[in-house]
Amino acid sequence: MKVALFIPCYIDQFYPNVGMATVRILEAFGIHPEFPEAQTCCGQPMANSGCMTEAKPLAENFIRTFAPYDYVVSPSGSCVSMVRNHYDHLVSPQDPDAPRVRTGTLELSEFLVNVLKVQPPTGEFAQQVGLHQSCHGLRELRLGPSSEVMRPRESLIQTLLSGLRGIRFSELARKDECCGFGGTFAVAEEAVSCMMGEDRVNDHMKAGTQVLTAGDMSCLMHLDGIIRRRKVGIRVMHFAEILAEAMKA
């Protein structure tokens, strides 16, 4: 199995430990990913702002860069969803590599659970963890249950964390509500974005969350900003960091 690691811009620039934790987890399960240095942004910020002309060469570069691999794994549901669900109008339908690269681009938890079929890893993490289900991962990749879909569905992230000794999960009042980040939405609609984030932080505070986790550091970056400004005693960690710390991977 030839696996490539795709690291989103904000992880590369602000949260490199998340990328390193992802590598350690993959290696713990026998996968030694390659990091193609030709990779760039997936184009999501441009596409979200309506700048499709600027997003197109980035999408084409993504397909070209990752064409030699069986799977592309990323610790970001939003970037993975961009590739899987929104590249159809950015790459040529005549590109023979595009369909395979798009379907083979997976978020870390779905690669571990659905491809590698790993059992919940053992380790210790004696904290109360609040899980934020990011919108792209939840509603575009279906990585967890959403309240509007009336059928049971496991949260892949919670499944992976559930084997850790001492871990407890917060019971939130609104477990699948948006954090308010939304990329450029947080800039264009700052007040609304901040109020949505405040709501999410308040929900976690009431639930007794000690560690707030998610599969998208973009959401966690937004929530962490609110937590730090309010001086709330909640630690923010990507789920890959929790697994790597608990497993000592």
Image (tube, helix red, strand yellow):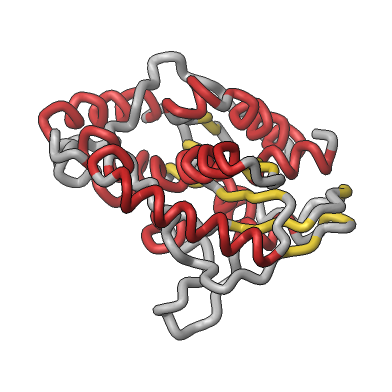
Q: Quadrant of residue 172?
A: bottom right
Name the residue located 43 percent from the left edge and 44 percent from the top edge. Answer: 104
Q: Is residue 78 above or below residue 16?
A: below
Q: Residue at x 54, y 68 (%)?
A: 175
Residue 94 visible: no
- Name the residue rendered at 82%, 43% in the picture: 246
Snapshot quadrant of residue 203 = bottom right
Is the residue 249 above or below the residue 61 in the image? Answer: below
Q: Nearer the viewer, residue 217 or 153?
A: 217
Q: Dividing the image into 4 quarters, which one contains the C terminus?
A: top right
Number of residue marks: 0
In the rendered structure, the answer to whether residue 41 lies left or right of residue 165 reads left
Direction top: furthest residue: 37
**Picture coordinates of residue 74 (x, y %)?**
51, 38
> Which residue occupies the extreme left position in the image?
53
Residue 145, percent across and down?
Answer: 51, 71
Taking depth in this image into account, of 143 and 30 the one nearest to the observer is: 143
Q: Give the residue drawn at x 57%, y 50%.
A: 214
**Among all residues in the image, which is located at the extreme front?**
230
Q: Quadrant of the N terminus?
A: top right
**Residue 159 appears at what percent x and percent y?**
69, 62
Where residue 116 appears, x then y in whole percent? 65, 50
Is residue 5 among the parts visible in the rendering? yes
Q: Please state which of residues 154 and 50 is positioned toward the viewer in this rendering.
A: 50
